[in-house]
Amino acid sequence: MTQILGRLRRSTAPVIAGVVIVVGWELALLILNPGGFVLPPPSDIIGAVFENWSEVFDAARNTGFIIVTGLVVGVLVGVAAALLVTRFRLANEVITPLAVSLNAVPIIALAPIFNAWFGLLSPRSNQAIVVVLVFFPIFINTAKGLTQVEPSQIELMESYAAGKWTITREVRIPNAMPFFFTALKLSTSLAVIAAIVAEYFGGRQDALGPLITQSAGLTRYADAWAAVLAGTVIGGMLYVLTGALERVAMPWHTSMRADQQSN
Amino acid sequence: MSAHAVAVKAASKVFNQGKSNEVHALDEIDLTVEDGEFITLIGPSGCGKSTLLRLIAALTEPTGGEVEVKGKSAEQARLDQDYGMAFQRAGLFDWRTVSKNIELPLELMGWSRGDRVRRAGEMLELVKLPEFGGHHPSELSGGMQQRVAIARSLAFSPSLLLMDEPFGALDEMTREHMQDELLRIWSETHTTVVFVTHSIPEAAYLSSRVVVMSPRPGRIATIVDVDLGDRSDDTREDPAFFEKVTEVREALRAVESA
Ligand SMILES: Nc1ncnc2c1ncn2[C@@H]1O[C@H](COP(=O)(O)OP(=O)(O)OP(=O)(O)O)[C@@H](O)[C@H]1O
Ligand SMILES: [Mg+2]
């Protein structure tokens, strides 16, 4: 019971803050009346969502598809690479420097080039951008979690004559879970940004990126903001989903228990 | 089997050999432990007790000499799962419940689920934590975690037990209880025990031989034979027991002042 109350209290604070910001925003525009339509009041944005519901919804669905598929592939590749690197020395010598130099490349800046590779209107280039961008934090953090294991825990397993894969399964992977989920949360917001910005340069035209650029170009700012709002909702949903996954995957995790108790 | 339980022959261990941070942890250690014997290692911090235990466990290799366990190389004995080890740090897995931690070695040895669960239950009774099976280790105090680690090391009834200060974090009464339980298990199962401790009375109470080590480089200074017969609560107040405590203390003092 106290847990439920605590959880309620934790989730009410941001909701109240959100309401205050939105109402303040609406009132400020009403009172100051700056003129022009650069920053429309929240009511106009909500109105724009309902007015162009099918357009906004289709765009959100198409961009959402790119985000989710890119995220899934990027995460799978990142985790696989991390497992290889921590398990085989040769893989480490090949993949790690490659990944680190990849991280130095401003990936988003490659969007126009990817479009040239995959075809200007193909969503593949946008997916590829998301995959590459998600890969790095997942790879680095998971690899860190797989290697930063207490030496005595490895020795314990060796004292049972456990082999390398058994140690990976029983010790390294559970140990990497918190690292992985930290990276996953970071990756979800990265993926949303990457997909929309990549869409500015090419890919499907019925997606959030083009909807933003085109609406802004036609000075239909409320529509542009409606598309941004849709992107925000996708990001929020992914974040909540990640949090739920985390709780299922790591019921033991102390940081969660700790903040339950602090309420 | 006529072989010794453990035979350490002129074993040395140098860490970071040839580098500026070189450490002579152990120097030409000779030690044999007979089947069914209970010996303790005692000595100042850093004298190489844990290192010697890890050599016997084949968790690290000697830089000189050799170590045999049950007549075979220590490495072969490790692969044959011939010993159970309790480490200085409890080393429990947070992602497993207390019961599942105790079941881990049994799982790796292919015990059936039913047998594992039953055994974990027995072990939890033994260390007086029967109601904590479903908890996660982070919910337990340090001493309770150590008791779980002891239960885990005993779970598969290894014929050789290597224990590194297993009772270090326990309060005095629990400690005495665990000592008596360990002695009971030892005499009932004819296990061989090599036990590291910092406590002089504990060494005298538990073992038939106390190996006193000196530091830098780690060597065996003296071995004190303890012949007190079957231990009981009376032993702890027996003048013969205090004599042994004094003997070990003096051996240690000689080591520390050398
Ligand atoms: N992995 C290692 N690398 C380098 N030096 C080490 C390593 N392990 C131990 N040593 C050194 O070897 C010496 C003996 O260490 P050891 O842990 O065996 O001591 P100990 O007798 O168990 O001490 P304590 O009673 O404090 O547990 C110490 O000087 C320590 O610094
Ligand atoms: Mg030690």
Image (cartoon, coloured by chain):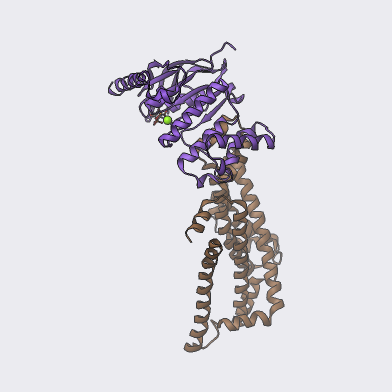
Question: Residue A50, position in %: x, y?
Answer: 67, 81
Location of the N terminus of chain A by quadrant is: bottom right
- Which quadrant of the figure has residue B244? top left
Question: Residue A103, position in %: x, y?
Answer: 54, 53
Q: Which quarter is ligand 1 in? A: top left
Q: Which chain is purple?
A: B
Up-down: is B239 above or below A50?
above
Task: Looking at this view, name the residue that lies furthest to the top.
Answer: B2
Q: Is residue A17 left or right of residue B241?
A: right
Task: Looking at this view, name the residue that lies furthest to the front.
Answer: B234
- Which quadrant of the figure has residue B79? top right
Residue B17 visible? The answer is no
Residue A138 visible? The answer is yes
Question: Residue B6, position in %: x, y?
Answer: 52, 17
Q: Is residue B1 left or right of residue B255?
A: right
Task: Looking at this view, name the residue that lies furthest to the left.
Answer: B257
Which residue is depicted at the point 56% across and 37% down? B124
Up-down: is B53 above or below A177?
above
Question: Residue B250, position in %: x, y?
Answer: 31, 20
Q: How many marks?
A: 0
Up-down: is A132 above or below B116?
below
Chain A rendering hue: brown
Which residue is depicted at the point 62% across and 24% down? B80
